[in-house]
Image (cartoon, grey):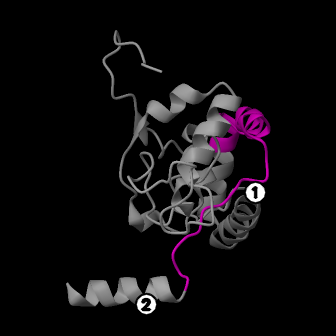
Amino acid sequence: MSNDISASASASASGAWPRPFRPRLTARMAYAMHNVLGANAFYRAFAGRLERHPRLYGWFTTGERVSKSALFGCRMCGQCALPATGYTCPMTCPKQLRNGPCGGVSADGRCEVHPGMRCVWVTAVERAEEASHGADLDMLHRPVDHRRWGSSSWANYWQGRDEGLWADPRPDDEPVAR
């Protein structure tokens, strides 16, 4: 246990913890792009081809990492939650919380770990509601499968591996309280 604490302390001191990131693409534009890149037979075949050719897959994954990192602060978890979080990457939360903010968010929306920055989840709520996708934030996210770190979330999505990443926690007949 003390090794975990030492590792955590040294990671924090070296600045290795994720920092909240404000996406550079509007939520509306990101949702529109998602509709264009939605899973279909063409993209499924394309992803399959990529995965059969490691060099192509590597180039594709590098392109995904560079573009998504610049636009959304993507950390390449391989299980993209952007469509369910107002296109705000929850992995940029220093605590890497995927189901909403921690209890340390300040009254003005600042991050507990990086007080000079806005909480990722406050940004997610603002962006999702602005794009009329506020109900997406009610979804429960399953834990990250760390074996997928560094893999292409686009290929995983097109191949159907992202099915069930999030689920509606309410019974079908229960309205969402807002």
Give the crowd class for mark 1: few <14, some 14-19, many >=20 residues within 10 Å.
some
User: Relative to residue 177, is residue 102 depicted above or below?
Assistant: below
Q: Quadrant of the N terminus?
A: bottom left
Circle 1: element type: helix
Q: How far from the left and from the top, in percent, is residue 97?
A: 43, 55
Give the residue number, with chain letter if any, for mark 1.
71
- Tell me: residue 172, above or below residue 26: above
- The answer to which quarter of the image holds residue 177 is top left
Whichever of labels 2 and 1 marks the residue nearer the N terminus, that label is 2
Query: Can residue 158 be seen?
Result: no
* Residue occupying the point 77% across, 38% down: 33
Left or right of 160? Residue 8 is left
Give me the C-alpha separation between circle 2 and circle 1.
28 Å
Q: The magenta stretch spans which residues?
A: 15-44
Q: Nearer the viewer, residue 114 or 152?
A: 114
Find residue 152 and report its image quarter.
Answer: bottom right
- Mark 2 surroundings within 10 Å by alpha-carbon count, few (fewer than 14), some (14 through 19), many (20 or more): few
Residue 10 badge: 2
Residue 149: image x %, image y %?
49, 67
**Residue shown at 26% from the left, 90% from the top:** 3
Q: Foreground: 56 or 73?
A: 73
Q: Quadrant of residue 119?
A: bottom right
Q: Residue at x 53, y 81 (%)?
A: 16
Q: Position of residue 37 (x, y in %)?
A: 72, 39
Q: Residue at x 59, y 54 (%)?
A: 89
In the image, farthest residue toward the left? 1
Please determine whether, in this image, residue 66 is positioned above or below residue 172. below
Q: Nearer the viewer, residue 149 or 3?
A: 3
Q: Is residue 36 magenta?
A: yes
